[in-house]
Amino acid sequence: MKDAFPGLAFEVVGRPQDLQSALDLAARDKHQFELWALSVVEAQPWKGGRKGADGGIDGIIYFKPDGKKTERAIVEVKGGATGVKDIGRLAQVIERERAPFGVFITAQAPTSAMIRDAAAVGLWENPTTGRKYPRLQILTLAEIFQGKRPNIPLVDVASAGKQAKREDMDAGKQGSLL
């Protein structure tokens, strides 16, 4: 909507706007919670967001480390209890998929063992800039509501899907959404 109608004021209703409402959604509808969390970090839902076995991949964030070749980061979302085993599984998926990054979104604060195992996955070095990034990043819902996002170079929203066509906002041609 924002791409198609720049300058248009509208309010999104029904999406979590705070930590408590996000936790409530996670408790009520795991799938919708996952889709919401993916949208917040600009990840595309794996296999179009269809329910079913996902092989440890809930979503993908596309990025271009060199401005040319598109790479992908694997995203896993957990709204309930988590543990060190979840970090190990995501690390295996990163290797299996040959992905530079994995992002673990969790409703709970990670344990020290989870943080340790995520750090043990190592760093990824951008071949163009030489800048280093953690290969497995843990992001909590509390951090998301504070504005934190995955530390990934040049997120490539255009490769993830088509952008909306910009519409003419001439008042004589366009109706109101309100």
Image (spheres, rainbow, N blue to C red):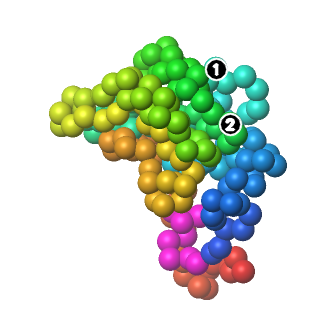
Badge 2 amino acid: Ala
Depth check: give the residue in front, 118 or 31: 118
Q: Which is more toward the observer, 83 or 37?
A: 83
Front-most of residues 163 and 116: 116
User: How far separated are the C-alphas under marks 1 and 2?
Assistant: 19 Å
- Reading the image, the residue beneath label 1 is 55
How many badges with numbers are in the image?
Answer: 2
- Residue beneath the point at 25% across and 34% down: 132
* Mark 1: few/some/many CA within 10 Å (<14, 14-19, 20+): few
Numbered badge on residue 154: none
Q: Is the C terminus in the top left, top right, bottom left or bottom right quadrant?
A: bottom right
Q: Which residues are magenta?
A: 1-9
**Could you tell me the amino acid type at mark 1?**
Gly
Residue wearing tag 2: 81
Is 178 placed above or below 104 here?
Answer: below
Image location of residue 124, percent across then percent down: 30, 28
The structure residue drawn at horizontal position 58% and vertical position 78%, both measured from the top left corner, is 9
Residue 47 on image: x %, y %? 65, 30
| Magenta span contains residue 76 | no
Q: Is residue 63 above or below residue 94?
A: below
> Residue 89's x, y, as percent?
56, 20
